[in-house]
Image: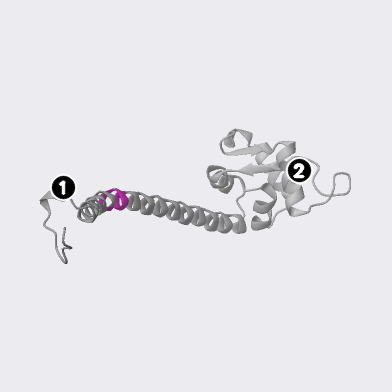
Amino acid sequence: MLDSDLAALYEVETKALNRAVKRNAGRFPPDFAFRLTAQEAESLRCQFGTSKEGRGGRRYLPLVFTEQGVAMLSGVLTSERAVRANVAIMRAFVRLRRMVESQRGLARKLRELERKYDAQFRVVFDAIRELMTSPEEPEASRPVIGFKPDS
């Protein structure tokens, strides 16, 4: 999540959130929080229509927080609002993780069913093909049926 999004949820200014993170830098290793590259920030700016550089808006590249970084913010921002927002965010992460896992489980079950039924249907299709092709018999061994012209 972006620092500005979290700041809005916690009802603090983005610069106050970033200051708190900077004061507690040891709690936010790169796998908890990191700065976007200039290219990534530009891509976001274009997508969200934020102000151009030099005309207000951000002066620094945004911080991005992973799930663990959001959890760590609860120890840094201790207002009642921040704690409530953090609990809600963590619950959303848990729901998201459960949804992803259920999709993985569903995909796995589908693959198993496909393997199981593909093999069974292959047998059925092979049997149908076999029934569709009759064994060829030589012409001479077949009796002639119907009108026989005089020879």
Residue lying furthest right: 55
Tell me which amino acid carries mark 1: Pro
Q: Which mark is residue 5?
A: none
Q: Which mark is residue 42?
A: 2
Residue at mark 1: 138
Tell me which amino acid carries mark 2: Glu
- Circle 1: element type: loop
- Circle 2: element type: helix
Query: Quadrant where the C terminus lies?
Result: bottom left
The image quadrant that residue 124 belongs to is bottom left
Residue 145 is a magenta residue: no
- Relative placement, left or right, of 135 versus 85 is left
Residue lying furthest bottom: 147
Return the residue nearer the eye: 61 or 14.
61
Say if 148 sits above or below 137 in the image.
Answer: below
Say if 145 sits above or below 21 in the image.
Answer: below
Return the residue nearer the eye: 103 or 8.
103
The dominant secondary structure in magenta is: helix
Residue 43 position in % (x across, y down): 73, 44
Q: Residue at x 53, y 43 (%)?
A: 68
The magenta region covers 112-117
Q: Residue at x 56, y 59 (%)?
A: 84
Tell me the crowding category of disc 2: few under 14, some 14 to 19, or many 20 or more residues within 10 angstroms, Cα based. some
Residue 60 position in % (x across, y down): 77, 40
